[in-house]
């Protein structure tokens, strides 16, 4: 549908995914599909535009699961491996494109991609089998068709990290911040009262570079979104149990969840 505006969770897991290799905990042994979490990533569809947020190590399986064949751009939150390590899987999207694939990120994020996947960025890369990137530094808001994308600087770890605000006409506004320890004042102002807030809630207990559940709930209360979805989750949650304790409007996201953003 050309007037569609939606967001699909391709992954809602932390950097090791869920289940965790070699773990026998109840979550990792669970048969509940909501306990199967690929590494965090989303897909935003707006009109004819399909935007992938991050290319994590599960990208191949995420794309196959969603039947994803084409993307118009990748936008990166930061250069941690759970958000970039599927870079080479972008090849399949380049094979069906005449033009190079736009990759948007901060200067430091693109620099890391260039260092890690240098062959793709060399000017003499005319190999039709390779990823053919069109690296674009994010300096401020930018558009794809009617979709407006605004970077949301946050503090997360040593690497420069951003989230994104997605807006299209008078549809519901969405803020996506999968990795965060502190949301600075200027970003809070950008997302205050947003319709949908998607945020890191790594695990119940505190962590040095991610929101815990309580920190995520405090941010949700501060921002006052109509809907808040928790993501980037570890195996430390009993989804059914925790879901019953969440305040109204706050829910744990799951892989394949699709949010419709168009107002009907
Ligand atoms: Zn486990
Ligand atoms: Zn990270
Ligand atoms: Zn992460």
Image (tube, rainbow, N blue to C red):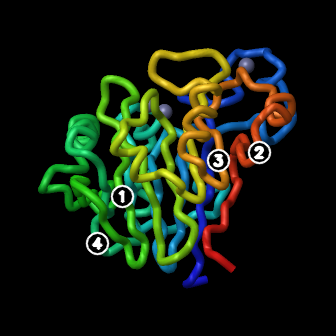
Q: Position of residue 243 (x, y in %)?
A: 81, 36
- State the SS at label 3: strand
- What's the CA distance linking mark 3 and mark 4? 37 Å
Residue closer to the observer: 189 or 65: 189
Q: Measuring 45% from the left and 46% from the top, which residue is drawn there?
A: 55
Which residue carries the number 2 mark? 248
Q: Earlier in the sequence, mark 4 or mark 1?
A: 4
CA distance separating discs 4 and 1: 24 Å
Image coordinates for residue 24, horizontal then vertical, percent: 79, 15
Marks 4 & 1, CB-CB < 8 Å contact: no
Of badges 4 and 1, nearer the viewer stands: 1
The relative height of residue 52 versus residue 154 in the rendered view (above or below) is below
Quick one: label 2, few (<14), some, or many (20+) residues within 10 Å?
A: few
For label 3, the residue is 228
Q: Are dots 1 and 2 in contact, CB under 8 Å?
A: no
Q: Are circles 2 and 3 on residues that touch, CB within 8 Å?
A: no
- Residue 243 lies left or right of residue 69; in this view the side is right
Q: Residues within 10 Å of mark 3 (few under 14, many from 20)?
A: many
């Amino acid at each position: 549908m050309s007037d569609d505006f939606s967001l699909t969770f391709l992954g809602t897991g932390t950097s090791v995914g869920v289940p965790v290799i070699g773990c026998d905990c109840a979550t990792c042994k669970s048969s509940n599909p909501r306990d199967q979490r690929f590494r965090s990533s989303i897909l935003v569809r707006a009109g004819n535009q399909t935007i992938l947020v991050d290319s994590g190590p599960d990208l191949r399986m995420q794309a196959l699961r969603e039947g994803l064949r084409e993307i118009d751009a990748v936008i990166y939150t930061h250069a941690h491996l759970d958000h970039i390590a599927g870079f080479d899987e972008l090849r399949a999207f380049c094979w069906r494109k005449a033009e190079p694939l736009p990759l948007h990120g901060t200067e430091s994020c693109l620099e890391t991609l260039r260092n890690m996947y240098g062959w793709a960025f060399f000017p003499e890369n005319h190999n039709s089998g390779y990823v053919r990137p069109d690296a674009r530094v994010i300096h401020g808001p930018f558009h794809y068709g009617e979709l407006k994308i605004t970077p949301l600087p946050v503090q997360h770890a040593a690497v420069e990290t951003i989230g994104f605000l997605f807006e299209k006409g008078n549809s519901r506004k969405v803020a996506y911040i999968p990795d965060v320890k502190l949301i600075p004042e200027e970003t809070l102002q950008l997302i205050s009262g947003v319709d949908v807030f998607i945020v890191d809630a790594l695990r119940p207990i505190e962590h040095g570079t991610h929101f815990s559940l309580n920190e995520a709930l405090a941010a949700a209360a501060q921002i006052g979104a109509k809907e808040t979805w928790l993501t980037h989750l570890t195996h430390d949650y009993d989804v059914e149990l925790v879901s019953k304790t969440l305040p109204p409007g706050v829910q744990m996201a799951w892989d394949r969840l699709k949010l419709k953003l168009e107002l009907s």
